Amino acid sequence: MARERVTALLYGWIATLAIILGASLILSILLKFTKFGASALDLTTLSISVAALFIGGLVAGIKGKEKGWILGSLTGLGFIIFILLYQYLGYGSGISFAQFIHYAGFLAASLVGGMLGVNISSDTSSSK
């Protein structure tokens, strides 16, 4: 049972990472070749991050099939820890209050995604 949860977490993290990397590529192309300004980038990246974590939690919940709130929370926490380590080790900066609020939103999005993912997986398995 624990092996299935770890597999579900890995799928959630991979989905989140793939969405964020794809969105980063698209945003960098838009910044390079259009008049898309850096002022619009803050809200755009926040929205993409929340959506990516929601989808990552959803994938983890679908794969895990139970305890979606735990899978979603762990998916979000893994992402947050990765970002904090990158920020601290790479740039030597700590966390601000605004970032704390963003991270709480990330955690909430992945938690809700995990809970919905379990419900989606139980709906599809009960209809068979």
Image (spheres, grey):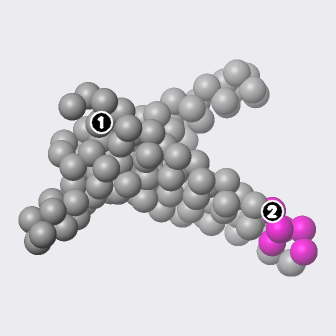
Query: Magenta segment range?
Result: 28-33
Residue type of the residue flagged with mark 2: Ser
Magenta segment includes 31: yes
Task: Name the outermost residue toward the front.
Answer: 128
Residue type of the residue flagged with mark 1: Arg
Q: Which mark is on residue 28?
A: 2
Q: Which mark is on residue 5?
A: 1
Q: Residues within 10 Å of mark 2 (few under 14, many from 20)?
A: few
Q: Is residue 43 left or right of residue 102?
A: right
User: Mark 2 or 1 closer to N-term?
Assistant: 1
Spatial CA span between label 2 and label 1: 34 Å
Q: Secondary structure at mark 2?
A: helix
Instruction: Note whether residue 111 is visible.
Output: no
Residue 84 sits in which quadrant?
top right
Q: Secondary structure at mark 1?
A: helix
At horizontal 66% and vertical 30% (from top left) the residue drawn is 86
At horizontal 35% and vertical 42% (from top left) the residue drawn is 8
For the image, the number of numbered tags is: 2
Q: Position of residue 15 (x, y in %)?
A: 50, 52
Task: Name the outermost residue toward the right.
Answer: 33
